[in-house]
Amino acid sequence: MSGYFSFQLKCNQVHCSKFCAPGGFPFMTVLQACAREGLSCQLSTFGFQKFLYFICAFQNISCGIHYLASVFLTVAPYHTCRPPGNVSQVLFGNISIWRLEDIWILFFTGHKDQILVQLQNGEVWELTSCHRFRRDDKSALNSDYHGQKSSFPCLDGYIYDKSKWDSTVVTQWDLVCNREWYARMVQPVFMVGVLLGAMIFGHFSDRIGRRFVLWITSTGIFFFGIAVAFSSDFYSFMVTRFLLAMSGSGYLVVVFVYVMEFIGMKSRTWACIQMHSFFAIGTMVVALTAYFVRTWWIYQIILSTVTVPFVLCCWILPETPFWLLSQGRHEEAQRVVDLMAKWNRVSSCKLSELLPLDLNGPVGNEPSEVKKHNLIDLFSDWNVGTRTLIVWLIWFTGCLGFYFFSLNSVNLGGNEYLNLFLMGAVEIPAYIFISWGMDRIGRRNILVFSLISGALFCGVITVIPKDYFVYTVVVTMAGKFAIGASFGLIYLYTAELYPTMVRSLAVGSGSMASRLGSIVAPFWVYLSNGWTFLPQLVVGILAFVSGTLSLMLPETRGRPLATTWEEAAKQEREKESSGKLFPIASNAALEKVEVIDSGASGLGE
């Protein structure tokens, strides 16, 4: 899912004073108030902002592509040891053929994994997927042999089934047998890069600007994506994929902050949720590309070209007025506002008339003392600590389930390309569902419903017979819908659960927990080696526990965002005594939120 974000209340808090006008009102709020007074200098969802939003959201497709490209990059086809010489005859089961490459169709008939070959020098070898044995006694080419055998490693390489894929990363560097764990590390190492990239580029965006980081990361996504395809060995492949992960994650973190600082408050909830839909489209593109292209390096190049339109257009993106004002670059901020007004065909207004700009420094006066908050503040008392642990569990479960369902889709049976396509397609209605439901049904109710539903669907999967793969795919889609909905909602819900003083810290720590889930997810798929449905069972148990514990969390729909823990506790007591929600309009809470501090916000999709 794409991007993490953080929120802050009206600027009476010291953390966002640099974005404030006198009296504690955010820059965006002042401009919208200006518009209501007759000046057409509003930063709402006019044409200019829509243009920026969809340009940036389109690049999310590329991020979704690279996050799940390994599903087909690391396909391990049927294979057998290569014999140490030219083959004159092959025996597989009771069928004799002349070419070793022609035996793969027989693997689908249920024969045991053993191939007999006779070399031109008369030697008979027994080949398996990871071992080969030479019959010490000369014998006819048949399976009835009880003499001595000598075991040899597969030093001559392997022969692979090319009926589905001409080549993959596995076949390129023989990542099978005792090297199989190399292939299993491809996705976890990528996710570690996601974690590191989000922390680095999130910090840089606050120091050198959102636009410049978007340029760097987008260029990195393109060049490292192409470099992956031309890797000369497995280690260079892993390094370039790691750098690609850092670039993609950095883009996701910063682009979320970037678009939120341009989008008007009325549309911010919708825009925040639907950014994930473009990431889902990337998953669908992976499936379509893999269906038509069966050579891994060509597949990788084609996927990397999706980012070209953004790389060509990103130079026209302006810096956000928020960041420019925070750096004291008032004239540049005014030019951006004038450009927006010209594009939207409205009259502009002067920032100097709205904000008492200090021409020698950033907007607002920095307080002399700012209290630093750390992770311990999320465990300030028993109730707060319990809330934090529940939120972390939800983040972990949501991300684990999200990536597990996608990565495991190729193992469900049937057409693996269609399976992955459907796993991406089902996310889009999930995000529409939470966009519609969270202001009508409530954040907590949607979250509980999604997690419990996901657990039930995981349970249903375990009782479906293996041969009924169509039913398995359908129920898995339902599970991905439920888990995807919970994962998309937890971003916003976490921000609303915590007061301003620790809100960024709460979202960032939750994001860290989710990264652990994404790193573990590839290994989770391999639990099926013990029992086919063990991964689904464990994900279902985690989802059920998370959903049940979510009932302990307060509902935040229609509630003003708290600035301190005392204010949050007071709101909860008032809600319990009245039995009604606070009488404010839908999304009013979120509409008071400003996007800040991308470095502390979170850690990528």
Image (cartoon, helix red, strand yellow):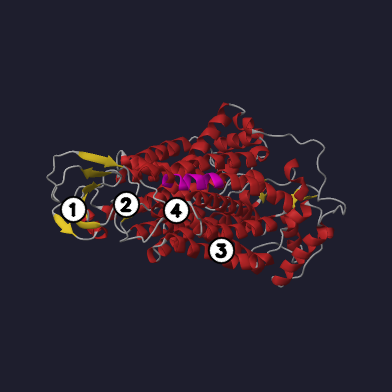
Q: Which mark is residue 196?
A: none
Mark 3 lies on residue: 307
Q: Which residue is mark 1?
A: 92
Q: Which quadrant would residue 145 be assigned to in this image?
A: top left
Callout count: 4
In the picture as drawn, the residue positioned furthest to the front comes out as 121
Foreground label between 4 and 2: 4
Distance of label 2 from label 1 (alpha carbons): 28 Å
Residue 49 in the magenta stretch? The answer is no
Of the image marks 2 and 1, the number of the one nearer the N terminus: 1
Whether residue 507 is visible, yes or no, is yes
Task: Residue under label 4, please give it.
Answer: 70
- Left or right: residue 67 compared with residue 408: right
Residue nearest the observer in this picture, 67 or 100:
100
Asked if residue 206 is positioned above or below residue 578 in the image, the reply reads below
| Camera-nearest residue between 147 and 72 | 147
Q: Is residue 250 left or right of residue 174?
A: right
Which quadrant holds residue 312? bottom right
Q: Residue at x 81, y 43 (%)?
A: 366
Residue 191 within the segment the image draws in magenta? yes
Q: Secondary structure at mark 4?
A: helix
Q: Which residue is mark 2?
A: 412
Of the numbered discs 4 and 2, the one sitting upstream in the chain is: 4
The residue positioned farthest toward the bottom in the image shown:
345
What kind of residue is marked 1?
Phe
> Which circle, 2 or 1, is nearer the viewer?
1
Query: What stretch of residues is rendered in magenta?
Result: 183-193
At a point 71% along the width and 47% down the height, the residue shown is 10
Q: Earlier in the sequence, mark 3 or mark 1?
A: 1
